[in-house]
Structures are given as C-alpha cells and as structure tokens.
Amino acid sequence: MVFKNLNNLVTKLINAKKSRKKIAVFLKTGISLNFFFLLKKEGVILGFTCFKFKIQNFIKIFLKYINFLPVISKIKIISKPSNRIFFDFNSLLKFNIDIGLMILHTNYGLLSNKQCQFLKIGGEAIIFFR
C-alpha cells in the first residue's frame, strides 16, 4: 500500500514539474504528509499547506524554482513492489551526498540519506531526486 501511494505522489510530482506548475494538489494521507514534510526540510519544495474541500482533505504544495528552472531536475523511483532495494549503513556511506537526495523507508519512517547517515541506520531506497 505504501508503494502505491508513493508512486502516485511521485508521478503527480513529475507531471507538475514537467508542466512547470507552481502549485500541485494531492490527497492528504499520513505517508504523503511525511513525504512533503521531508521534501520541505531538504529544500526541494517551498512549502505546503493542508485544506479541506467538501469531505476530502488535500495538501497543496508549492514547487521551488531557481532562475525559472525547477530544483528537481530528475526523479527516479528506485524500489518497486517486484524489486525492493535495501541499503545498509555502510553502503549509504559510499553514496555521495552531493549527487542528490535519496529517500529511504526505515523503521523510523521516511528519512533522507543524510538523516540515515546521521542516525547510522539503513533502509529501503524508495526515491532518488537530483
């Protein structure tokens, strides 16, 4: 279930980036709220707000652009339900932080590769941003 929700989020995020939208709207779930909070913390998006329309709750995110170019140049889904890829702490140390941002699903929830290196834990690689 986590993969389905995250894949939908990432697909909508890719489409919003390609069409150069400034604002994108997503359904509010626990995993999406954690995902966008992590993206805001890492500086990938400007921010997000939650609002309610009729019965449903939604999240409105504000995409970040620098000199009319999106901050997110490439988004890649690493793990899929058929092929799950895990990184332990030692293999995360070999990953260069300057290359991009990798989001991992750990026992502590969704964390970036920087946070996992700080906490000295590994996890399942979900998405890679450049």
Image: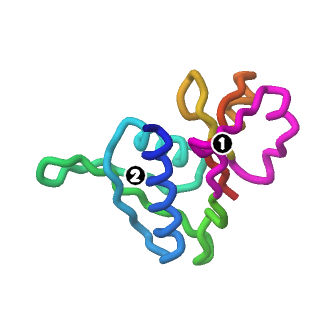
| 46 with respect to 49 (left or right) | right
Provide the residue span drawn in magenta. 76-101
| 85 with respect to 111 (left or right) | right
**Residue at image mark 1:** 83
Element carrying mark 1: loop
**Residue located 70% across and 58% down the image:** 130
* Amino acid tagged 2: Phe
Q: Is residue 108 above or below residue 25?
A: above
**Residue 22 at x, y = what percent?**
44, 70
> Where, by quadrant of the figure, is residue 125 drawn?
top right
Q: Nearer the viewer, residue 11 or 103?
A: 11
Q: Quadrant of the N terminus?
A: top left
Q: Is residue 6 above or below residue 106?
A: below
**Residue at image mark 2:** 48
Q: Distance from label 2 to label 1 (Cα)?
A: 31 Å
Element carrying mark 2: strand
Furthest-left residue in this view:
54
